[in-house]
Amino acid sequence: MNLLGRLLPAVPLTTGALLLTGRFTVGRRRLDPAAPAAAVLALAATLGLAVAAALARPAVRFPLFGRLPAGLAVDGLSAALIVTVAAVSLAVVVFAAGEFGADESRARFFGLMLVFTGAMLVTVTATDLAVLLMGWEVMGAMSYALIGFWWRDPGRVGSADVSFLTTRAADLGLYFAAGAALAGTGSLDLAGLAAGRGHWPDLIAAGAVLAALGKSAQLPFSFWLSRAMDGPSPVSALLHSATMVAAGAYLLLRLGPLLTATGWAATLVAWAGALTALLLGAVALAQRDLKQLLAASTCAQIGFMVLAAGAGAVAGGTAQLVAHAAVKSLLFLAAGAWLSALGTKDLGELHGAARRYRLVGVTFGIGALALAAVPPLSLWATKDAVLAAALADSPALYAVGLAAGLLSAGYAGRALIAVTRPTGAAARGATGRHGTRRLGPLERLPLPVLALGAAVLGVLALPPVDGAWRDLLGAGGEPAASPAELAVSGALALVVLAVTWTFVRRGVRARAAWTAPALHWLHLELLARTLVARPVFALAQALARFDDRVIDGGVRVAAATGRRAAALADHRVEVRVDGLVDAVGRGARWLGAAARRPQTGQVHTYYAQAAVLLAVLILIVLLVR
């Protein structure tokens, strides 16, 4: 059991580390051709280990930081997550193996992807905040390297910087939570965080919520996910589906007892998720770039998971997470396939793409309809499971969530209509990459598998499977969507799709005054720069000036005073000391010359000298006595 628990994250982590270090020891040219196959094999083994771990439920315990217990364990929630992470990662890496050519640094790319996946597996199986933080931090570092993978492009590197700094700023909350946990409970164990004394649980919850909202790109941190679109399409597919952004939602679902114990945290989380789902749904509806539309929709769909965590719907939120992983990885890989083949991701230039590449078009259509919550596809049922818990919590919360669900039908329908509309012109984009006009078999292979998941995973929230799903997660007693609620939401999704089709066909456009903020992601990055980045830079510059003029100035004054004192000593004190030394030397020389004079070599002279000395000695003896 312990070996299985250790091997699960160790296989991708070790293989990824070997690929990254082997570039310097073996050589890139020799390692790059074998890197895709090594990555696929490693993740296939990881998927097998994940299935075995989900059944066997291994646990690994070890001491950390002295006597604090730490470890990895697979329970119901992490069992669902490890299988999802491993399966989606394998599908994405298979696609990337076909997309990345010989001119790319494949060992570096696949090494980073494997370490990224391994870090996510550590995060979802960690039993304490210390080990969770290790996986959390490695995942953040890998995301930075993957978003900025094409590092020769300053724009992409800048996007990686924005993404990394935004998430890192929020990640400080997790360190704060760990410190509060040690002070309040004397332990970092996740299961015991709600048992702290006094206000310590509130402080732990505050730090964890901040870190989770930042990692999952919820308001007000959502803008970093827009910047993350500058990375390769496989990175977007993995980052937006089963790793990184899903990690924040997972953490909130895991810490449900802590959120409930504080009271305010559960309400805050529920409303943060609902408002993100609504407002970022509006952002997605306004986008003209397919990847930007999908990115905004990721924020919105993760918002339903966050809403579920706040409303206490662990089963519904986890079902939404699993189904969304299949849907969003499918949609991003399809968008990446069109970008590779046609060289564009602009919705206006993708007309006819689904007709031209039938397999991609059909699978994208399944994913888009699932994203729109059209019955009987997956997100229809999982989203209603979340909304049922919201209704039991607050009718206002349910209303906001329902409106966000209807918006998802609008933006999913807009993307689907764009790629299925006929066109007589070849697509051409200004993305900086020329289309290849072809798709390889490896790029096509994962799409039907993911489409199947996008179609059927909603069964997790439907009878009779939903009962077994709740038992697996230990989430009995959660409210379930009634048949009437399911029917109404499905009908409304179809109505919104029909309205969207009518508006697009007639060329109806919303006013720029309404769409401009949404098109620019509600100007969240501008607000962050204005309210946070610029004041911090201004404070840093002021401190630098204080350091230069006051602290450093004081050091310079002290140095100048020392130099003046030395000069003074050189001109006055040292002159006198040197004069005394010179006088002693002259005296010694004079005495030496005087002592040489009596040395004549004559006996009588020596005798006279001895007599004089004896006389002097007698006088001294007489006088002293």
Image: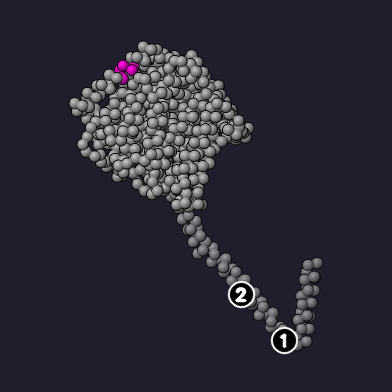
Q: In this view, does 261 lie above or below 89?
A: above
Dots 2 and 1: beta carbons under 8 Å? no
Q: Residue 600 carries which label?
A: 1
Query: What secondary structure prevails in the magenta region?
Result: helix
Position of the C terminus, as image quadrant, is bottom right
Query: Camera-side residue: 588 or 564?
Result: 564
Q: Position of residue 448 (x, y in %)?
A: 39, 31
Q: Position of residue 352 (x, y in %)?
A: 25, 34
The span shown in magenta is 489-493
436 on left or right of 185: left
Q: Is residue 10 visible?
A: yes
Residue at 34%, 37% (x, y): give it: 337
Q: Mark 1: few, some, or many residues within 10 Å (few <14, many ≥20)?
A: few
Task: For marks 2 and 1, give the CA distance.
Answer: 23 Å
Splitting the image into 4 quarters, where does residue 301 fall? top left
Q: Is mark 1 on a helix, strand or loop?
A: loop
Position of the N terminus, as image quadrant, is top right
Q: Is residue 261 visible?
A: no
457 on left or right of 52: left
Q: Where is residue 5 in the image (x, y as percent from the top left)?
A: 57, 32
Q: Is mark 2 on a helix, strand or loop?
A: helix
Q: Tag 1 or tag 2, which sits nearer the N-term?
A: 2
Q: Position of residue 246 (x, y in %)?
A: 43, 30
Q: Mark 2: few, some, or many residues within 10 Å (few <14, many ≥20)?
A: few
Splitting the image into 4 quarters, where does residue 542 fall? top left
